[in-house]
Amino acid sequence: MARTQTSSSKLKKKMPIKKASSNKPKKLVAKNQKKKPINKKSVFGGLASDQLRHMHQLMVKSRVLEERLIKIYKAGGAYFWIGAPGEEGFGVPLGLLVDKGNGPTHDYLHLHYRGTPTLVAMGMPMIDSIRLIMNRATDRCTGGRNFSNHYCFPEWNVAPVSSPIEVQYIMALGTARVQKRRSKKSLTIVTGGDAGSAEGDFASCLIWASRPKEELPLLITVQNNRWGISTNYGSQHGEESVADRGKAFGIRTCVINGNDPVESYIKLGEEMDYIRKNRRPVLLEAHVSRLYGHSSASGANPVDELDPVREFEQKLLRAGVLKSNQVQELWKEFDEEARAAHELAKSEAAPEAESIWDHFYVNGENGDWRKF
Amino acid sequence: MANMAQAIRMALHYGEEKLGVQDVFGQDVGAPLGGVFTATQGLETAWNTPLDERGIIGTAMGIAMTGERCVAEIQFCDYIFNTIDLLKIAGNTNWVSHGNYPMPFVLMTPVGAGIRGSVYHSHSFDSWASRLPGWKVVMPSNPVDAYGLLLSAIEDGNPVLYLKPKALLRVKGEELLPGEPSSEKELKAMIDAPLGDRTKWRAKWPKIEDFRVPIGVGKITREGSDLTIVTCGRDVLFCNEAADQLKEEGHSVEVIDLRSIYPYDWQLIKASIEKTRKVLFVNEDTEVTNFGEHLSYRATKELFYQLDAAPEVLAGKNLPGIGLHPNLEEASVPQTRDILESAKRLLSERP
């Protein structure tokens, strides 16, 4: 079972950072360095300039937040970092398309530990993510109990992220089942990585989502970064595309360039509309980058892969949708916001030792056998 | 009187009719079979799943996340072991999410030996279950408790593991459930599916009533003053039998049916040991790191100076399986004769 890895010097020595460029499809790593004029309609899919700027803004915000989390870890302010730099081109559009709210008439999200871009796009304040990685008593996701990016927001139907990276695929079946009988439009979104798709729970998800006459309104995504910690996708998977596995179950499938936020936004929108209307599942594979390695266990240092935020930014600059001074100002503003949130979290209390008994059972019922 | 399978069926019907249960599911749980022990026959909300224990428990967790109540089943506890990480997550989700995501669902599974079930239909899960913090774990020993515990489990806000002693599922009770017809024949005609074609059959449910057995509350099934025996599930019947036999020999033995393995009724156990000054813990799970050992430790730690004999644990032999032949099965898990032997040894001890 693949899991998040905790930090240790031993692990760091064993797992040098690998450059992924040789293992990625050429179209994903080819950098757009030639300054050709941009055809707005074809490159940006007809999206309005305001939409493009908004998407870029959220991608930058997510990146700045993740880089702040890494800084916090490297400065000794956190025990572990894992996150999503490189997935902004997929995660932000996904977050923008979610029907946000509480209960089965809104969308459910069963994310894995690379969900920051999606949650930033949904409106998560930076401070929530920083309190989580710093294990503050104010961490409203876990009360200081879990790793970074292990989010949980019940008011938006965001289920708790857990380190075993396959279990979300089967929990999603339950929320989707309830939605099927209680809503005509809401859906469940479940995300995971290419390495995690080797787990049996991924196959379970495909089987249960496509039971005859009981198909589920489920968006099953695989963010394929071609790595499982240090193990290359091509060395373990014979299937060219993870999405192909859906075909055996009659599940509609789709493969997209998740590094392109415009393509992600349009394709995700189409597939989510299909699910909302037809109440049937879709398996969508998005090819994405992994810019700082798996986690802090492998150093959390920059890796030479396509950067979807900078790539999109350059396109917007060349098309005149953004101006360079706006861009500089944007990065600066978010950096200041992250810095201020970090300072605030630093000033806040750590969880009390006695809080270990909180929420053992619901309603404050204590599970300590010594007190029975 | 209803047997335990019928009592469970009626509790599930009460759950779907009055307590908001919309899904009772697992392998062969829906029509036409209604469960391999018939405990889910005739239910409106029962449905069949793929042969996939992880999918069953994952689905139950997802349903619970929406706030709906469901009851899932793993066909035999012998097949629950590939879900152990899911059981861990179900137990820790409310805790790790800082109270944001309670996980209220019931997971039923038949446990224990006694039906000549061989290596993969005879396991116990009691001690494994006791090491799943965040869960409540119950095991009835009679139809009335099976009914009352299941209603409490459905309404509980936490995950509840409902262990069904498979050897007792066909055993009739000694008292009627509230609302149960007094005629067994009448009850059978109403809620037991017929043999053969069942496509047009519908259960006719009696007007059963609300009745709860609180989780965490044990019950004294035999009162006595010379020795306490603490047990649960099928072993309650063996221990009662042993106590009755010992009574004829002039010994006064108290038997406690735990009903809840966790949280357990320590105050009931403690009060009994303080009275009898000797205690024997009996259950079927394997003896090394058995939950009876935990209770024995606690009795020793808290009641050391009130004991007239060292507490004893009589549990399943520490074997990798339970052999099919009766000679093998009966040598593997406690029988009445074993309980009598341990009880007599304890009764004969003098401080």
Image (cartoon, rainbow, N blue to C red):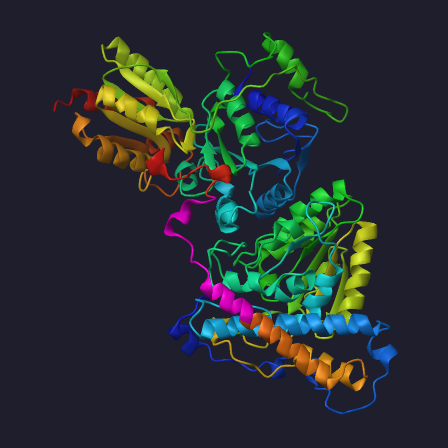
Q: Is residue B27 above or below residue B11?
A: below
Q: Nearer the viewer, residue A148 or B222?
A: A148
Give how far across and how far down residue A59 sits, in percent: 68, 72
Residue B109 seen: yes
Q: Nearer the viewer, residue A227 or B157?
A: B157
Q: Residue at x 87, y 77 (%)?
A: A41
Name which quarter of the figure residue B323 lies in: top left
Most common SS among magenta residues: helix
Q: Residue at x 76, y 62 (%)?
A: A253
Per the image, is A355 magenta?
yes
Q: Is residue B80 above or below residue B193?
A: below
Q: Which quadrant holds the C terminus of chain A?
A: top left
Q: Nearer the viewer, residue A68 or A272?
A: A68
Give how far across and how far down residue B176 sits, in percent: 54, 12
Q: Nearer the viewer, residue A53 or B131?
A: A53
Give the residue at the far left of this rendering.
B351
Name which quarter of the figure residue A28 lies in: bottom right
Give how far across and how far down residue B321 sits, in percent: 40, 40
Per the image, is B96 magenta?
no
Total numbered badges shown on the rendered structure: 0
**Residue B283 appears left or right of A230:** left
Name which quarter of the figure residue B304 lies in: top left
Residue A290 seen: no
**Residue B351 appears left or right of B141:** left
Task: Tell me which segment is drawn in magenta.
Answer: A340-359
Q: Is residue B335 above or below residue B318?
A: above
Q: Residue at x 74, y 45 (%)?
A: A105
**Residue A208 appears left or right of B152:** right
